Amino acid sequence: AAALAEGRVPAATRETLAGKRAIELGCGMAGLPGVALALLGCSEVTLTDTASVVPLLTANAHAASEAAVAAGRPVRLRAEELDWLDDAGLARRMGEDKYDVVVCADVAYSCDLHAALLRSVHAVLAPEGVAIFVESDRSDTVTTPYPSSGDGAYLPRRRS
């Protein structure tokens, strides 16, 4: 976010993201990584979290959109519910348009949710899309980075 605010984002990054559809999973009330993707040129960004968070997330997405318009950089942001534990909802998503970019920031703090998170990524990611996982080191109970399973998939594991 600091690089974006200071204008230090490489032109190649902007070119790569231009016109792409992006979704942020588990973005909480702010959706900052999703907002950054919109400002970097994604044509549409969907911010998601559970139903209890969506009203405030919607208000914040609207405020971010207004601020971007005022700065001469209009963006297309929307907020919606996506519950990783709702198998029926994920099944419905499998038939919808997919996203070119999926971003997950600080969402792997509970090992119990890893399988649901990966199912959610699979439900929304386009075949040639890219998923970006960013995690902070919260404690010894946090997982290590997702190691490759050898077939291009990345699987969670508990820190030893």
Image (cartoon, helix red, strand yellow):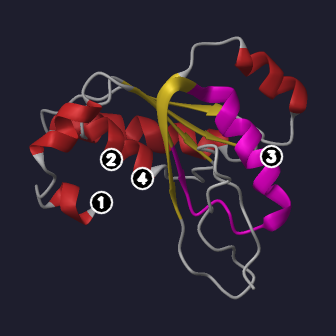
Is there a contact, CB below 8 Å, between mark 4 and mark 3? no
Measure how far apart labels 3 and 1 are at the Cα level.
27 Å
* CA separation in Å, label 2 and label 4: 6 Å
* Residue 58 picture quarter: top right
Residue 88 place in picture, x, y as percent: 89, 24
- Residue 122, how many percent across, how many down? 68, 33
Q: Which residue was labeled with disc 4?
A: 32
Q: Assess disc 4: are there few (<14), some (14-19) or many (≥20) residues with their C-alpha within 10 Å of its C-alpha.
A: some
Compare marks 1 and 4 and give the one earlier in the sequence. Answer: 1
* Mark 4 or mark 3: whose residue is earlier in sequence: 4
Q: Is residue 158 above or below residue 148?
A: below
- Residue identified by numbered label 3: 116
Measure how far apart labels 1 and 4 are at the Cα level: 8 Å
C-alpha span from label 2 to label 3:
25 Å
> Closest to the observer: 66 or 33?
33
Are the residues flagged by discs 1 and 2 in contact, CB closer than 8 Å?
yes
> Between marks 4 and 3, how big is the CA–CA gap?
22 Å
